[in-house]
Image: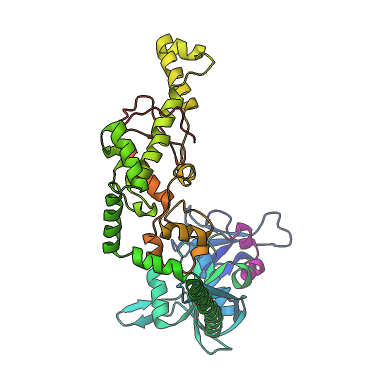
């Protein structure tokens, strides 16, 4: 701060910043650059002085020292003939065939730059715009011009930076905004800090274009290797898929036939005709349903996508699922346990004894109720209900049943996405049927992919399943 006892002043004769320890005793030409007030040099008898040397205003003033620091730093840069550049990072970036970016970053450490022909505040014009760099000089090694900006309070803004970029004028910014205050005490320490030690960045730099090219070249190599690997992997996967399709031609042909809508319609009609065809599984179930329910109940005659995974009319497998997930679950939930229903003291106090008892009753229901998943239902009925050829062949090839339609297993690598989507999957078909029961309020979702009959569910179809083997 420019208060009583500061170190810098402006020489009114030369216009240069001077340090109190570098002027004659009783220096009479000091002025303040901010308020133009004369300065008094308190530096007489330096060897015998007990107080430090300093400049002071002849009159009281609250001027700030940033102007002098800024001016002094510019002088130092212009007079030293050398400055340390900034670190430079060259980044190469390119996409491979998978559109994934590959990066290479090369770093150039700061180099000492020899300078000549330094000028302060030289005005530069570009079109209708002009800027005045703090120092404009020439770099000895490259012969290129260099603008040096000193940041005390105001960094180079975007507009000024764009000016240097448009001019392709190398620009180095030296940051004195966080300079330790004690450096003002020593001209040598200040000069060293400005020239070598202060933080600095390149606003624009053309010195290391070769490094940019090298970084881009390295990134290109990475992307090229990745692309080659992608092509190789694609070729490898293509060969695997082709071989898989050759090895599983039976499944491929079944999928092709099944994928034709007219064929599916014919099979649905065929299964429907089996209801009245003696000797078929569908007919035997229909006769039993007729005798017990007086016809084919709607709740087990719901058309669903993928229902042709079973080699029978939909009422056959839907009845077996309904028995287990609805009737058997309801039967087990209504069976009283040997232990009496208990309520907690806390529940009795808050809700009253009757309400607490109801809560405990409901909890007891869910404790007794079997919880079914589409997979467990499939496991329970698969030995009773025959599968269509396409479903059984797909499970044979994959070595497993399919619990989801989202992710095609690796064991079916050669099956195309559309073929996988078309493939009827028993567990997924059972899940669709369960969702229809959910819509009707017959079931509710338990945590995970499991389902249970709620206590007050209205059952559209009732039958004694106490002897059902599950």
Q: Which residue is pictured at 44% across the width and 66% down the height? A: 251
In the rendered image, the residue lying farthest to the right is: 47
Magenta stretch holds residue 220: no
Q: Position of residue 103 (x, y in %)?
A: 53, 73
Residue range highlighted in magenta = 179-192
Q: Position of residue 12 (x, y in %)?
A: 49, 71
Q: How many marks?
A: 0
Q: Relative to 110, is 389 on the left or the right?
A: left
Nearest the camera: 14 or 394?
394
Asked if one can make out residue 179 in the rendered structure from this viewpoint, the answer is yes
Magenta stretch holds residue 186: yes
Asked if one can make out residue 415 in the rendered structure from this viewpoint, the answer is no
Nearest the camera: 320 or 229?
320
Nearest the camera: 83 or 158?
158
Q: Position of residue 174 (x, y in %)?
A: 54, 69
* In the depicted structure, whether residue 383 falls above or below residue 190: above
Q: Which residue is pictured at 36% across the width and 82% down the height? A: 125
Q: Relative to 434, is 84 on the left or the right?
A: right
Nearest the camera: 450 or 287?
287
**Predominant SS along the magenta part:** helix
């Amino acid at each position: 701060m420019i208060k009583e006892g500061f170190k810098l002043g402006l020489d009114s004769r030369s216009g240069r910043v001077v340090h109190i320890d570098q002027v004659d005793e009783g220096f009479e030409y000091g002025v303040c650059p901010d308020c133009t007030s004369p300065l008094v040099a308190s530096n007489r008898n330096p060897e015998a002085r007990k107080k430090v040397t300093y400049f002071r205003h002849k009159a009281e003033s609250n001027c700030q020292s940033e102007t002098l620091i800024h001016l002094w730093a510019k002088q130092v840069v212009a007079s030293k003939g050398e400055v340390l550049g900034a670190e430079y990072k060259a980044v190469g970036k390119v996409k491979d065939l998978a559109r994934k970016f590959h990066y290479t970053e090369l770093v150039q450490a700061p180099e000492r730059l020899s300078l000549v022909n330094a000028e302060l505040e030289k005005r530069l014009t570009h079109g209708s715009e002009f800027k005045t760099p703090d120092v404009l000089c020439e770099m000895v090694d490259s012969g290129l011009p260099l603008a040096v900006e000193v940041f005390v309070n105001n960094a180079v803004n975007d507009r000024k930076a764009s000016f240097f970029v448009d001019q392709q004028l190398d620009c180095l910014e030296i940051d004195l905004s966080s300079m330790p205050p004690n450096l003002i005490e020593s001209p040598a320490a200040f000069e060293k800090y400005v020239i070598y030690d202060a933080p600095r960045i390149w606003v624009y730099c053309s010195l290391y274009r070769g490094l940019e090219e090298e970084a881009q070249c390295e990134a290109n190599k990475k992307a090229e290797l990745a692309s080659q690997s992608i092509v190789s992997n694609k070729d490898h996967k293509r060969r695997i898929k082709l071989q898989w399709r050759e090895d599983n031609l039976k499944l491929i042909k079944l999928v092709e036939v099944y994928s034709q809508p007219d064929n599916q319609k014919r099979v649905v009609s065929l299964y429907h005709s089996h209801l009245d065809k003696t000797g078929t599984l569908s007919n035997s179930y229909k006769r039993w349903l007729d005798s017990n329910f007086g016809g084919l109940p709607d709740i087990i005659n719901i058309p669903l996508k993928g229902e042709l995974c079973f080699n029978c009319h939909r009422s056959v497998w839907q009845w077996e699922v309904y028995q287990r997930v609805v009737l058997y679950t309801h039967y087990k939930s209504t069976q009283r346990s040997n232990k009496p229903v208990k309520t907690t003291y806390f529940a009795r106090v808050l809700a009253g004894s009757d309400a607490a008892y109801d809560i405990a009753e409901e909890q007891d229901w869910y404790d007794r109720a079997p919880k079914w998943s589409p997979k467990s239902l499939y496991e329970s009925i698969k030995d009773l209900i025959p599968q269509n050829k396409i479903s059984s062949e797909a499970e044979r090839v994959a070595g497993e049943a399919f619990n989801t339609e989202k992710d095609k297993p690796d064991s079916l690598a050669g099956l195309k996405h559309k073929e996988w989507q078309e493939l009827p999957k028993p567990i997924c078909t059972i899940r669709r049927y369960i969702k229809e029961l959910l819509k009707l309020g017959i079931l509710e979702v338990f945590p995970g992919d499991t389902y249970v009959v709620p206590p007050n569910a209205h059952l559209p179809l009732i039958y004694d399943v106490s002897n059902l083997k599950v």
